[in-house]
Image (cartoon, helix red, strand yellow):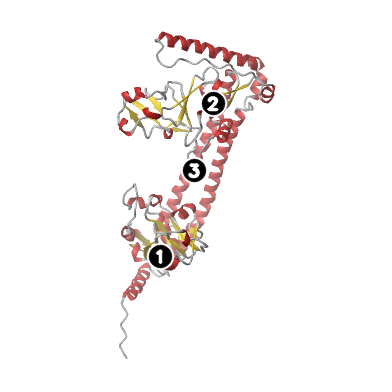
Amino acid sequence: MNEATLPSGWKITALENVCELVAGNPAPQGHQYFEKGKFNFVRVQDMGRMGDSTYLSETKDKINEQAITKLRLFPKGSVLFTKSGASTLNNQRAILGKDCYVVSHIAAALPQAGISSEWIYFALVCVDFADLAHSSVMPSLPLSKVKSIPVVIPPSNEQHRIIAKIEELFSELDKGIENLKTAQAQLKVYRQALLKHAFEGKLTAQWRAANPDKLEPPAALLARIQTEREQRYRQQLQQWEDAGKSGSKPKAPKPLPPLTAEELTELPEGWITLCVENLFDIEDGDRGEHYPTKGDFFDAGHCLFLNAKNVTKRGFAFQEMSFISEQKHLELRKGTLKRGDMVFTSRGTLGNIAHYNESIEYEHVRINSGMFIIRDYDISLTPDFLYYHLNSPIITNQIEKLQSGTAQPQLPIREFKSFRFVIPSKVEQQKIVEELESKLSEIDQLDQTIKTSLQQAEALRQSILKRAFSGQLVAQDANDEPAAVLLARIRAVREAQAKPSKARGAK
């Protein structure tokens, strides 16, 4: 900032010259200080709950009269900001809408007479405290650095005119952002509705009506799947015997259960339903005594070792990777991926899916015990049909019903084996995938347009503040008292308050 480029009557000064900067209070320790509490006690999470709101007037915690005896009360209009802990990097700001007590993780700027709280608030919104904080693991913000932050000060009257204009423009901008976020949420609902309709047969209802000759009777489809699984088993068994019977012996496929009249009535023509254990093989990651420890990992390892954070709704995420040595890779008994396998997260965030196909460059990949491997599904399902099916409400609803745990949800493998899939012929599966990808592509384009618009809205917000703090947002008034006079008056008041009073003489 340069005063030479500012309007006449504006000044630049350190924040400490126009505000008193103070830290909050130590939090009272003990439930007795919160019983029948009636005084607001601001914690960091209260600022986080405010979202984009400027003012903070209500808090989750209330303290009682016993607690406030040694605490400082922060007046209405105090500008709060976090100064310690990870939330310091979130640049949370708020103006107290009423008198409150404030925790020590938060500090406040108390503006002097003639300095608007909103002006200081918007000035601090423009400052990234991450640049001033010590450490990134447990950030802390020294008030000495905050005190020296340069602040542009216009005349008092102009501060209020600028703030009114900022709030007017921000209000219009917020309405637009709200509409964009509503549209974004509607797209998510539409995406789920589209997947629901796809696996209810509604997307291809007209195709089935126009192509009755391509439909396979349910009994024939079921029999064909059983036959092909038995053929696959015989091939695997022969390969196992030819290899000297090394490794696990292939398991014979279970007989497929007959279709019930109720199932046939509920399903679209030519569709059947089967549970996972009748459709494909499931394997979970390795665990127990052979599970890799920290010492088994190194930067340029032989085998990529994935955990649940490497699997998202849109596929694999390779930003954070761990590798294990060839020796450890050979020691592990389970969890080795083969090309074509699907990975399904079964702990923490449930139901994320990724496809280990030829596009993945890593040749040796293992997973940990927080995921399942889905393999040998191609007899009944095409890869894309399976991928979308696993993302559909049919599966997510079953996850919600059968998951266990609250702090860290889990889906036991025995429960996953009971999941039911709907299966049309492979010709119709391909048609469903075509319809889905066409419509989902349109959804993705709209979603990207909305994301771009939201980014532009945030850039516009910053542009408004930049214009405000450079004197370009409203017209100047030559009759306004210059900021230099205002700053001199603040300085004089502070100096007078700092002078010790003369001791009275004895009578």
Sequence-first tag of 1 and 3: 1
Mark 2 vs mark 1, CA separation in Å: 62 Å
Q: What residue sits right under mark 1 in the picture?
A: 110
Q: Secondary structure at mark 2?
A: loop
Residue 15 point in image, percent of width and height: 35, 62
Query: Left or right of 269: which side holds 313?
Result: left
- Please give the name of the residue rendered at 32% of the width and 34% of the height, measured from the top-left corner: 294
Dot 2 and dot 1 residues touching (CB under 8 Å): no
The mark lying in front, picked from 1 and 3, is 1
User: Which amino acid type corresponds to the residue marked 2 in the rendered image?
Assistant: Lys
In this view, 430 is above or below 8: above
Image quadrant where one finds the N terminus: bottom left
Q: Quadrant of residue 438?
A: top right
User: Which amino acid type corresponds to the residue marked 1 in the rendered image?
Assistant: Leu
> Which mark, residue 436?
none
Q: What residue sits right under mark 2 in the picture?
A: 417
Kindly tell me whether residue 8 is visible in this rendering: no
Q: Secondary structure at mark 3?
A: helix
Query: Left or right of 416: which side holds 317?
Result: left
305 or 178: nearer the viewer? 305
Q: What residue sits right under mark 3 in the picture?
A: 453
In this view, 249 is above or below 489: above
Sequence-first tag of 2 and 3: 2
Residue 61 point in image, percent of width and height: 49, 58
